[in-house]
Image: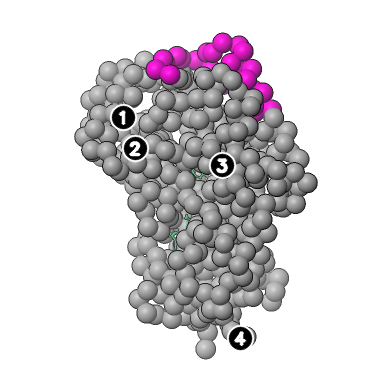
Amino acid sequence: MQDADYIIIGAGAAGLTTAYELKKQGSSVLVLEARERVGGRTWSGMLDGAEVDWGGEWIGSSQHRVYALVKELGLHTFPTYDTGLKVLELRGRTSTYRGTIPSMAPWKLLQIQLAIWIIDAWANRVDIATPWNHAQASEWDATTLDAVRRKFMWSADARATMDAAIRTIFGAESGELSMLHMLAYVKSAGSMNNLISTEGGFQHDRISGGAQSISLALMNSVGTENVLLGQPVTAIAQDESGVTVTCASGKTFRAGRVIVAVPVPLGDQISFTPPLPALRQQLMNRAPMGAAVKIFVRYERAFWRERGFSGEAASGDGPVSVTYDQCSEDGKTACLMAFVGGKFARTWHRRDPLERKKLILDRLASYFGSEAKQPVAYQEMDWCGEAWSGGAPIALFPTGTLSTHGPALREPIGRIHWAGSETARQCMGFIEGAIESGQRAAEEVLALG
Ligand SMILES: Cc1cc2nc3c(=O)[nH]c(=O)nc-3n(C[C@H](O)[C@H](O)[C@H](O)COP(=O)(O)OP(=O)(O)OC[C@H]3O[C@@H](n4cnc5c(N)ncnc54)[C@H](O)[C@@H]3O)c2cc1C
């Protein structure tokens, strides 16, 4: 006796897209989610009347799947506020600029541009679905991004600018990233520019009501009775006729196939019978999550807008790597977001909370003016302490992982299939990637009948 045709583990954007697509094709589905909410790494809430996205937030440029789904679900987007001066902080000095080119000595800018050209050119050479098959895959996978950064960037300012971007995109330091992962990531995103840009890039739009609205709307379409919250899955056993899934509550469920849509390293917390092949098992315990803390500061007025600032700042010095304007769509609630990533995020929780708040407010004041020291509300979201994410924003593939274990990312094992943003071929690591992976997983199981 089956509880559903398919069981999906994880009610993030990937798992719920899988369920949504399968349900549309007439299959019965059961989604098991560890948390008491849906959305996973997207989680929207309020801070003193201001709508905030504690997790994934922006969509943009070529991410056509998420735009299509947003429309299909009756949601809508609005542009990220991008008007006015931007701030760059490097080695204790702040400068302002407009548009996309920071005010920096031309030879330093040239080094940044050169690094972007090289990364884009190498990325274009890898196959989007199988980067590990490239003739240079082992060589790239034995090299960190830091090694490449040091080779092509001898200006400390140019390197620090890249650090700010890498801490934000990966929640990591460039020494933690394999060059092959970097190239696969850039290829799946289309270009470095897509990753770092607001206008025309991946930070172009926000979703009204927050990015979690996508998962909430998907859950409603799938049927809330088919999404069980507070049910961490502890074991999956497969046999000739189906799979049995066991939750920490002791409940068991039976289906024809299971789609595991949890972040790659969290798969390691589930016990599999029979055991998984070594390559998949090793992939799960070789891929740590990045480290990120998102901090929201609510103000009476958007004083930075009044002073001609966009609210966007980048810092190579840390602890903040970027800031963005987070005012509401109608501009009535004023809010700034500060992102702490990489090494600064990993140890953020060890600092005294008052010291943390002072650090953030001091940085914001140095970027946008002393009014920044007078917030009406302040709230941090530290993803490093989230048991069901294990960190954020994405899983990292350190050196020596993707070239060897990459083929196990999406490869089904009997009746077990894999989804999740890290398994995406396009926009890997983004909400778009989560949706792509969910659509791919649904097609994969439907094709098997
Ligand atoms: C701070 C931050 C900023 C980000 N910024 C952006 C952004 O601006 N734009 C963008 O596109 N992306 C962004 N991302 C990334 C984006 O949010 C993710 O790529 C995407 O949401 C991942 O979706 P997913 O469904 O693959 O995984 P998840 O959202 O992680 O979903 C997995 C689900 O599985 C559940 N789970 C885990 N283990 C178990 C278990 N054993 N049993 C049952 N359930 C389990 C989890 O609770 C979770 O709900 C950001 C992420 C973070 C955290």
Q: CA distance from mark 2 to mark 1?
A: 8 Å
- Label 1 – label 3 distance at C-alpha: 27 Å
N-term-proximal mark, 1 vs 4 = 4
Kind of residue sitting beneath label 2: Ile
Amino acid found under the numbered disc labelled 3: Leu
Instruction: Name the spot of residue 93 as percent of width and height, x first.
Output: 41, 15
The answer to which of marks 4 and 2 sits earlier in the sequence is 4
The earlier-in-sequence mark between 3 and 4 is: 3
Residue 236 sits inside the magenta stretch: no
Residue type marked 1:
Ile
Residue at position x 61%, y 70% in the image: 277
Please give the residue where the numbered disc 3 appears in the rendered image. 177
Q: Which residues are magenta?
A: 91-117
**Where is residue 442 drawn, in percent x and y?**
62, 65
Task: Assign the C terminus to one quadrant of the image.
Answer: bottom right
Residue receiving disc 4: 241
Q: Nearer the viewer, residue 263 or 350?
A: 350
Q: Is 75 drawn above or below residue 157 in the view shown?
A: below
| Residue at the image position 62 percent from the left and 20 percent from the top | 111
Residue behind mark 1: 360
Along the line of sight, which residue is nearer the eye, 151 or 250?
A: 151
Q: Which residue is mark 2?
A: 295
| Closer mark to the observer between disc 1 and disc 3 | 3
Label 3's element? Answer: loop
The amino acid sitting under disc 4 is Ser
Relative horizontal placement of residue 31, taking residue 109 as reference (left or right): left
> Does the stretch in magenta take in 94?
yes
Label 1, residues with CA under 10 Å away: few <14, some 14-19, many ≥20: many
Decide if residue 246 is on the left or right side of residue 148.
Answer: left
Q: Are marks 2 and 1 in contact (CB under 8 Å)?
A: yes
